Image: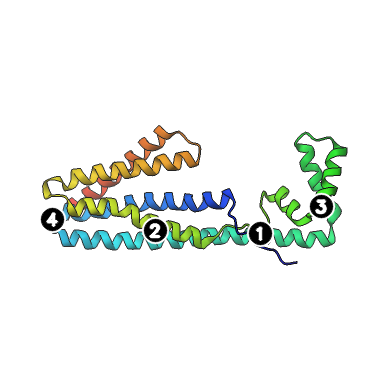
């Protein structure tokens, strides 16, 4: 039985891509500013600082993309394997699956008789779609796309790293550190705001946490740079 892939993305697929982008952006900001502060504390040579920052930006972006690809590929493979198992069970144990669907609707408060009628009707019309939705909360034909997550993470990590890099390179010497701290504070506040909204978390707590992490990151790396 061949499954058709729907063209329209589900909300879960869109949220997964957006999640990868937000996390990638945050990592890009913190990773790049860490390297910039380490190098800037050790030297005032703008070209050296720029090369170090740019190299780290690219490394971070590709590393984040590779990690997202591996992670989402694993999730997608697991989803496809689950569908294959249920597809086989439809041939060998369909009555058991009908009972599982019935139990699902009973858990929602539907009477046993009505739940059985619903289960039999759904399993007659769209058996595979019904069982994977009930058991795994999956929409048939919709699997997490590792390439979308990877590219989202790649570009967002690179974009996030641009904030501290531009601030550090373009600002006058007297304002480099202060300006970069401000740029990073604004950038991580934005990523915290978006991530908290996506996860229905507390916005203020997320912003304060991200700012503190950013400040600690810069302080640690600046201290390490001062050693050399």
| Earlier residue among tags 2 and 3 | 3
Q: Of the residues under marks 2 and 1, which one precedes in the sequence?
A: 1
Q: Position of residue 147 (x, y in %)?
A: 50, 63
Q: Residue 133: image x %, image y %?
A: 70, 50
Question: In the image, what residue occupies the spot 33% across and 62% down?
Answer: 58
Q: Is residue 96 above or below residue 215?
A: below
Residue depicted at 28% across the width and 51% down the height: 163
* Residue highlighted by disc 3: 123
Of the numbered discs 1 and 3, the one sitting upstream in the chain is: 3
x and y percentages locating residue 38 in the rendered image: 22, 53
Percent coordinates x, y for residue 7 in the rendering? 60, 59
**Could you say whether the residue bearing mark 3 is in a helix, strand or loop?**
helix
Q: Could you tell me which residue is drawn at 84 percent across and 57 percent down?
A: 93
Q: Nearer the viewer, mark 4 or mark 2?
A: 2
**Image disc number at residue 141:** 1
Q: Which residue is mark 2?
A: 155
Q: Earlier in the sequence, mark 3 or mark 4?
A: 4
The picture quadrant where one finds residue 35 is bottom left
């Amino acid at each position: 039985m061949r499954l058709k892939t729907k063209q329209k993305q589900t909300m879960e697929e869109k949220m997964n891509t957006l999640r990868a982008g937000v996390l990638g952006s945050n990592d890009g900001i913190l990773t790049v500013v860490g390297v910039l502060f380490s190098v800037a504390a050790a030297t005032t040579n703008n070209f050296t600082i720029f090369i170090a920052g740019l190299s780290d930006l690219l490394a971070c972006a590709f590393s984040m993309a590779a990690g997202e690809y591996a992670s989402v590929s694993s999730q997608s493979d697991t989803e496809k394997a689950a569908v294959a198992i249920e597809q086989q069970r439809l041939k060998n144990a369909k009555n058991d699956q009908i009972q599982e669907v019935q139990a699902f609707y009973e858990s929602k408060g539907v009477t046993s008789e009505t739940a059985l009628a619903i289960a039999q009707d759904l399993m007659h019309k769209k058996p595979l779609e019904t069982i994977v939705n009930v058991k795994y909360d999956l929409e048939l034909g919709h699997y997490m796309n590792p390439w979308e997550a990877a590219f989202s993470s790649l570009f967002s990590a690179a974009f996030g790293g641009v904030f501290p890099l531009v601030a550090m390179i373009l600002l006058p010497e007297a304002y480099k550190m202060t300006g970069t701290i401000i740029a990073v504070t604004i950038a991580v506040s934005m990523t915290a705001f978006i991530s908290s909204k996506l996860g229905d978390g507390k916005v203020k707590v997320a912003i304060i946490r991200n700012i503190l992490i950013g400040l600690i990151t810069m302080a640690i790396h600046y201290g390490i740079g001062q050693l050399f």
